[in-house]
Image (cartoon, helix red, strand yellow):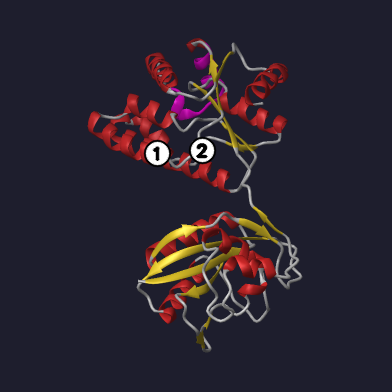
Amino acid sequence: MNRVFLCLGGNLGNRLDYLEKALTLINIKAGKVLKTSPVYETQPWDSGSAKPYLNMCAELQTVLSADKLISVLLGIEKKLGRKRNNSKNADRTIDIDIVYYNSALINNKKLQLPHPRMHLRKFVLIPLNDIAPLIKHPILKKTTKQLLANCKDKLKVTKYTQLKTKIICIEGNIGSGKSTLASALAKKLKAIYLPEEYKDNPLLPLFYKSPKQYAYPLETSFLLNRFQQISTAINQNNKLIIADYAFYKCLWFAKINLKDNELKQFNVLFKTLNKELTPPHLVVVINTHTKNLHSNIKKRGRRFEKKIETSYLEKINASYKKGLKKIKNIPQLHIEIEDYKKSDLPEIVKQITKSIS
């Protein structure tokens, strides 16, 4: 096994996401990542760019030769959108450099080891010092800690702290006014709004015509779509997200609509995806009577909703009550609404702001 130290960085797109994807691909294609440093935000080195980098270092265990390893790493860069040109230190989605490969000394057209400028750059030395402070440079005969102490680089390197995204979920039965309230709140609080994307789902009208036939593909499509929406919004480092649904509703509806064998499969997928998401900071639940639900459903005039029966709405209410009781350590704000009015918004915003402060 060979002991390798890498430096990863990029300043285009979702920088943190590119670092995470690069590490995943390195684990798959190059060897085993043993350690990773914290992520640092750094000024561009010797560049006129105004876009700061995210940088980190990683320790890798690999059976690959140095030449084979650099080919694999270049392939990962290309897969993640790295476009090389003749411009020196150009902006890039991801850059993966080999800093050390054992104690090897290599100097050819393809690769120079140890990295010829690593001792001059704090964005390499600072994260490298986090995971390998005592490793010695095979030429300079100094440890990472010593190289860092002697480095004259003046560029600013600071530990990167990702914004802690707060997620507020608006929940309630069909026709309770979730979307109206969620979009209004997002506008008022200057938050990212995640609407329920039912309009683009061709399975929904089919489900209302033939529930047994289309329930499983419909619920699965909603599950995957909601997961994609929420995870994308989180990865974009948004400070506040307001969704007109909670991810948990996938399971609440599935328990009503799916057969036992389908529900078992669905439950496994739900639990797997739910573990990957940041839990909501608050679930706002709109409670209103069934008569009002029918009135709102009629007003919005969606053809496929015309035949929704009271018994189905009551099943949803029951499933919601059971599901909400099982949610632990997440605040819930229950709001009784006869008919949502814009004049109600200031008071609702006040209640929600108080709950998340």
Residue located at (33% from left, 26% from top): 255
Which label's residue is closer to the chain start, 1 or 2? 1
Give the dominant element type of the magenta stretch: helix, strand or loop. Answer: helix
Q: Residue at x 50, y 28 (%)?
A: 302
Provide the secondary structure element on which disc 2 rests: loop
Label 1 is placed on what type of residue?
Leu
Instruction: Specify whether 98 is left or right of 218.
Output: right
Q: Which residue is mark 1?
A: 203
Residue 88, image x, y percentages: 68, 78
Give coordinates of residue 200: x percent, y percent: 49, 41
Depth check: give the residue in front, 242 or 357: 357
Mark yes or no: residue 24 visible. no
**Amino acid type, residue under disc 2 in the picture:** Thr
Q: Which residue is mark 2?
A: 278
- Viewer can see residue 173: yes
- Pinpoint residue 301: horizontal percent, then vertical percent: 53, 26
Q: Quadrant of the C terminus?
A: top right
